[in-house]
């Protein structure tokens, strides 16, 4: 890797969701000791506007080229943080998250010592991954708004109708001479016995 890696670690207290179990100050100090970490800080609510502004501020001030956020699940806030860094011209794929809320604080609330060890391990792993992240560019691919439904049974017919109502051109393919499948062969159907 030719680039001088400069990682910033942002530790979220998530109010008391994380801070009631994890010693966030010690986690910040631990993060500072990791290779290529040039900056680390804690924040009360990193996903809130002031927390995002702090990330943006320190990306510029500390000349960061990788960001690790130790907070909650990426499923919830990875898009939030990626959009946050885009606003300062930072590639969103240079952001890594460590889930210390669900994986440490919430599941090990009665085992604070073990939770803190695990939080350090997760931050260490995230920093290690961040070191090897590379900028990505999203591609725009043209989409053809048509669909192929294979099978003209009742499920195929319904799928074709639903797709057509959604604005897609639909091509329905059936190997038999007529559509309807087994349903077309029935004399009567339940519950109306029609």
Image (tube, rainbow, N blue to C red):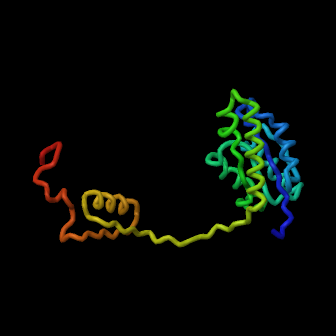
Left or right: residue 177 versus residue 122 is left
Examine the rendered structure and indicate whether residue 104 appears above or below residue 149: above
Residue 38: % across, % down: 88, 53
- What percent of the width, then of the height, locates residue 88? 78, 58
Residue 82 at what x, y percent from top left? 70, 55
Residue drawn 15% across and 48% down?
A: 189
Answer above or below: position of 42 versus 4: above
Q: Residue furthest top?
A: 110
Residue located farthest toward the left when viewing the structure as drawn: 187
Residue at horizontal 77 percent and vertical 62 percent from the top: 89
Residue 93, picture quadrant: bottom right
Q: Residue at x 71, y 47 (%)?
A: 98
Residue 12: x %, y % from top left: 76, 40
Which quarter of the rendered picture does the N terminus lie within? bottom right
Whether residue 174 can be seen here? yes
Q: How many numbered marks are there?
A: 0
Q: Nearer the viewer, residue 142 or 124?
A: 124
75 left or right of 125 in image: left
Identify the residue at horizontal 63%, vertical 45% (top origin): 76
Residue sitting nearer the eye, 99 or 119? 119
Q: Kindly tell me whether residue 49 is visible in this rendering.
A: no
């Amino acid at each position: 890797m030719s680039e001088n890696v400069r990682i910033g670690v942002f530790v979220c207290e998530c109010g008391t969701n994380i801070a009631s179990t994890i010693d966030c100050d010690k986690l910040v100090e631990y993060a500072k000791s990791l290779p290529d970490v040039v900056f680390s800080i804690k924040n009360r609510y990193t996903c809130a506007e002031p927390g995002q502004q702090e990330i943006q501020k320190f990306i510029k001030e500390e000349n960061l080229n990788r960001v690790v956020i130790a907070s909650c699940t990426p499923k919830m806030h990875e898009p939030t943080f990626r959009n946050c860094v885009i606003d300062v011209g930072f590639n969103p794929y240079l952001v890594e998250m460590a889930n210390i809320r669900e994986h440490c604080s919430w599941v090990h609330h009665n085992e604070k010592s073990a939770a803190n060890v695990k939080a350090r391990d997760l931050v260490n792993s995230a920093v290690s991954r961040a070191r090897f992240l590379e900028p990505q560019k999203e591609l725009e691919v043209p989409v053809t708004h048509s669909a192929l439904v294979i099978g003209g049974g009742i499920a195929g017919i319904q799928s074709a109708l639903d797709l057509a109502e959604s604005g897609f051109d639909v091509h329905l393919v059936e190997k038999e001479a007529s559509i309807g499948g087994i349903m077309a062969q029935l004399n009567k159907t339940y519950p109306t016995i029609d």
